Amino acid sequence: MKSEFSGLMVRGAIVALLFLSMLLLSCGPVALPFPTRKPPAPFFDVASLLPGSYLMAAPSLSEDGRYLTVGETEFAGVTAEDLVIFDLQQQEVLQEVYTGGVFTTAVSPSGRRVAVDNGYRKLLLFETGVITPTRVITGAVPTWSPDGQQLAYATSSESSDGQQRIEIHILEMATGRERSVFERASARAYIWPLTWSPDGRKLAFNLNFPPSDPLEPDKETASFFSLELRNDSTTVITKDWEILSLQFSPDSSKILVLGAPLPVGMRDEYKLYVMDNAGTCHRVKSPIPNLVEVALSADGETVAVHVKDPQWLLVAQTSEVLPQDYWETGVRCSSLLK
């Protein structure tokens, strides 16, 4: 009796496996972890220069668009952990360095220096071609000045009275001196993203306030600032936006924003907008779906985009993928709030 029962169990298992196999075949090929189709023209797939790469993120371009830095990993379900520097002109990998994490990258205008935010409140500074960091700083969200001689970044610390504060510091690379250009007392605020204008006069950043209680929305959610470096004065461009990427126009008068008005729904897609200091903006009609990050070279000629579904890091000439008049501004940003 026992042997008959065991035989039935084995036959049942075989039948189940055959049924499962037929079901999988009827559903078509099983999805692979790597994209199996080519990106649409005129985009260039950066992963083609680094076979075996699973994910590339956190793109940054040099001033002329020749050098591209990204965070990269070869494993599914793992955040980027290697810094990779590409020479797009020669279409080759210049450098690959394990950093333990890559949250953002910032390549200097000349491509000679790279700052990496490793996601643990540490900035690792590299010279191109050197595999060990030349300097380690406590901070996050780095951005280079147009001459590459200064680095701006965000810090958070606790004052002597126990108050948490968020700041933006500027480091002079030659002397090691640094100064604070922005400070805000808050236990919850953080700065993301942060970018320096091509004319060197301004910083733009989003100051975010995560909800203290998910069930009780806070009055203050986010403020998008422009900061004049000649006197450290700030202007609020707009409020209540979630922003993923910021890029100034070549003349520094406008800002390309990848984001969405708050609250962002589960199915909302982040879109490209152009904003200026007066708070006017318009939606850019971009053919690029599923955007996660956007990087623009300072001369405005080259764009790098991180898209999802599938995960791609793509590069193209800006004129080939964005409308010629995309820097023109339109309605007030506040009118786009939900």
Image: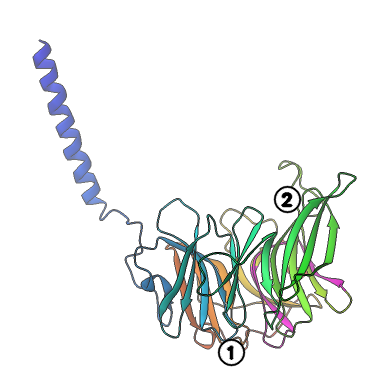
Residue pointed to by mark 1? 324
Seen from the viewer's position, the closer of residues 26 and 209 is: 209
Res. 49 image quadrant: bottom left
Tell me the residue at 69%/82% (across/down): 146
Q: Is residue 251 magenta?
A: yes
Q: Quadrant of the C terminus?
A: bottom right
* 181 relative to 310 in the view: left or right: right
* 188 relative to 128 in the view: left or right: right
Under circle 1, the secondary element is loop
What secondary structure is the magenta-colored segment mainly? strand
Tell me the residue at 62%/81% (across/down): 109
Amino acid at dot 2: Pro
Q: Quadrant of the N terminus?
A: top left
* 252 relative to 58 in the view: left or right: right
Seen from the viewer's position, the closer of residues 280 and 33 is: 33
Under circle 2, the secondary element is loop
* Residue 211 visible to the viewer: yes
Amino acid at dot 1: Gln
Res. 334 image quadrant: bottom right
Tell me the residue at 52%/72% (across/down): 69
The picture places residue 169, in percent across and down from the top left corner, at: 78, 66
Rate crowding at label 2 as few (under 14), some (14 to 19) or many (20 or more) other CA atoms within 10 Å: some
* Residue 208 visible to the viewer: no
Viewer-nearest of discs 1 and 2: 2
Write the start and end of the magenta stretch as one range: 232-258
Residue pointed to by mark 2? 210
The picture places residue 116, in percent across and down from the top left corner, at: 59, 64
* 60 relative to 72 in the view: left or right: right
